[in-house]
Image (cartoon, grey):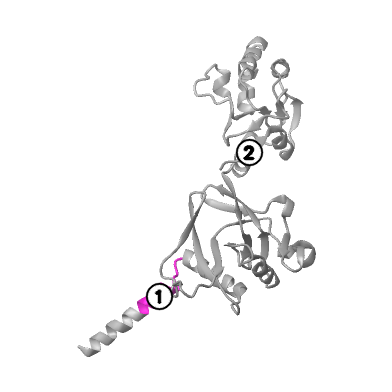
Amino acid sequence: MSCNGLKMKDFAASFDLQILNRGNDYEEAVLSITDVNRPGLQFLGFYDYFDPRRLQVIGKAEVMYLKGLTSQERKKAFDDLFLYDIPALVIARDLDCFPECLQSAQEHERTLLRTTETTVDFTAHTIEFLNRKLAPCIGRHGVLMDVYGEGVMLTGDSGIGKSETAIELIMRGHRLVADDSVDIRRVSNQLLGTSPEMIRHYIELRGIGVIDVRQLFGMRAIKIESQIDLVVQLEQWDDNKFYDRLGIEDHFTEILDLQVPCVTIPVRPGRNLASIVEVAAMNNRHRRFGFNAAEELARRVDERADLGSGKKD
């Protein structure tokens, strides 16, 4: 699924933009794509391939060109732009607003904003901000932890012990990102997970109830967001099922069209799940850096077998 968009008023508040003219759709207009546009070509009358959904930004280059026009020509340039249903026009560098621009914005009831940032900085920050806010997103049931710098998402049936494992990991010095529900966004080729704001920092423990991790363990026990590097699937131990004992083969699960390393940990009394998750996180990091203990062991066994075969010959 994709996020529906970011309301223009929320974007303006996030960047502390000065409102020069509040358009009639200011409360409801949304930014739905991550691109921004500098309408230099549009001021020349070129509107082929013009996408009105993009945020419009003008800086020193556009202002210097517009200064060379007559008042009537400037008015027409802004009128032509504001005929389109653009979300807003932002003036960068805290530059003065042309009277023709303000008049046209008022006549067409378009939103006109201003920022103190340079055009390049504002454009870069806006694209980065929108890439995160408008990224494809999905919700998953599970617990997300930061373990030795690895983002580990615990999944499994309700009551399998995810929250209990999370508490043990927190007491070992690791950090909670989300419990019960994980909001996942795909930003470029990374999966970033966070908690829904309503339940952020809370964990439900059967027999105790809901606890506030930040209040009980302090700020060191929480993290707002984490990349998802590993999925740990917890399931009840099944004596009739074969569990991988070497780990030579890599297993993955797909989230938002990205492949994420996945391991399955069978649960039964006596197993220290927190310790196993810690080892799984460290082992996943080693694999990502090119070291696979199972393959190294297999290589040593093969070398020993070859040596043994050579002695017999």
Farthest right residue in view? 215
Question: Is residue 293 inside the magenta stretch?
Answer: yes
Residue appearing at x 72%, y 40% in the figure = 14
Farthest top residue in view? 72
Q: Secondary structure at mark 1?
A: helix
Q: Position of residue 54 (x, y in %)?
A: 59, 30
Q: Position of residue 108 (x, y in %)?
A: 69, 17
Which of the two residues, 255 or 304, is positioned nearer the viewer here?
255
Q: CA distance from mark 2 to mark 1?
A: 47 Å
Quadrant in which the N terminus is drawn: top right
| Residue 296's disc number | 1
Q: Secondary structure at mark 2?
A: helix
Among the two numbered marks 2 and 1 on one chain, the one whose residue lies closer to the N terminus: 2
Quadrant in which the C terminus is drawn: bottom left
* Residue 6 higher or lower than 143, as above or below: above
* Residue 182 higher or lower than 287, as above or below: above
Q: Position of residue 234 (x, y in %)?
A: 56, 67
Residue appearing at x 73%, y 22% in the figure = 24
Q: Which segment is the magenta one?
A: 289-300
Residue ID for mark 2: 126
Left or right: 136 in relation to 213 = left
Q: Quadrant of residue 207?
A: bottom right
Left or right: 43 in relation to 209 = left
Which of the two residues, 42 or 285, is positioned nearer the viewer here?
285
* Residue 153 higher or lower than 25, as above or below: below
Q: Main secondary structure of the magenta part?
A: helix
Q: Quadrant of residue 37?
A: top right
The kind of residue on which mark 2 rests is: Thr
